[in-house]
Amino acid sequence: MRSCDVLIVGGGPAGSSAAWQLRRAGADVLVLDRERFPRLKLCAGWITPEVVHDLEIDLEAYPHRLLTFPRLRVHWGRLQVPIPCVQHSIRRFEFDAWLLERSGAPLEQHNVRHIAADGADFVVDDAFRCRWLVGAGGTRCPVYRTLFRDLNPRASELQIVTLEHEIQYDWRDCDCHLWFFEEGLPGYSWYVPKENGWLNVGVGAIAERMKRSGQDIRAHWAHLAATLEGRLAPGARYEPRQRLHHRRCGWTRDSRSGRGHRPCGAQRPARGAGDHRRQALPAR
């Protein structure tokens, strides 16, 4: 059985950033993830200057695709508003693997199935033992399901349904476009270009409101595809994937006190890493 101070379930930005900071503080950290990195991760995928600062990312030295937006173009009906800002578009396929490698924490490809307290420790699948257990596995995080679901059940109104796809495409418009509430959508659609010919497009909405109003997210996808065909991405071909997820993630459990802590709340695309690092560590 492998033992460590901190076991982190989930190797995405929240988990890898927590591992990075904990290792800097001298902790023995192990990360578990069911996927092998780099792995496909569909996400609109941009990071804010706050995340860049919190994670001490040197943009000049970042070795993968990174495109800086000087503005976001927000569409609301016939109104189009360019909002000045600074956002950095990344591909999660690259960014997540880079953060994990930078953390220096060892990664075990493992699908967690059983978590149990054992004296002052936690034991995971009779294969891993730890003093601290961090859940950073997103919507289906086994740490949440085992230790936090009864204490803090997820509200149905926080469940989001998305259809999205990331493709190689020689885009011409380098701005990020967001469409809010088009055709009665209780959410928004997006066009997010990536450096060197990649493009992420998608539709996201509150699942409960979609169901209550009898809407089909694929109809909203068809509307977005028609919009893109006419203006921004003519000739693009998509095979969108549907996902359900919640707007909060990240859990930490102390085996001795039994106290739990939820380090991050609602997140914007790829935003959770900085919040997780700042808020999870005081729980120690």
Image (cartoon, rainbow, N blue to C red):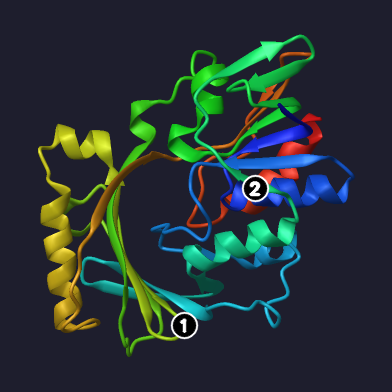
From the viewer's perspective, tell me whether residue 43 is left or right of residue 142.
left
Q: Residue furthest front?
A: 1
Residue 276 x/y as whole percent: 66, 44
Residue 114 x/y as whole percent: 53, 20
Residue labelled with disc 1: 195
Given this view, does label 1 or label 2 mark the residue nearer the observer? 2
Give the camera-side residue of 168 and 220. Answer: 168
Q: Amino acid at mark 2?
A: Leu
Image height of 34 relative to 261, above or below:
below
From the viewer's perspective, tell me whether residue 181 is left or right of residue 230.
right
Q: Quadrant of residue 157?
A: top left
Image height of 226 relative to 24, above or below:
below
Residue labelled with disc 2: 107
Determine whether the residue tagged by mark 2 lies in a helix, strand or loop: strand
Q: Quadrant of residue 120?
A: top right
Determine whether the residue tagged by mark 1 lies in a helix, strand or loop: loop
Residue beneath the point at 51% across and 61% down? 38
All told, the count of numbered labels is 2
Mark 2 burial class by Cα count in 10 Å: few <14, some 14-19, many 20+: many
**Measured Cα–Cα span from mark 1 to mark 2:** 28 Å
The quadrant the C terminus occupies is top right
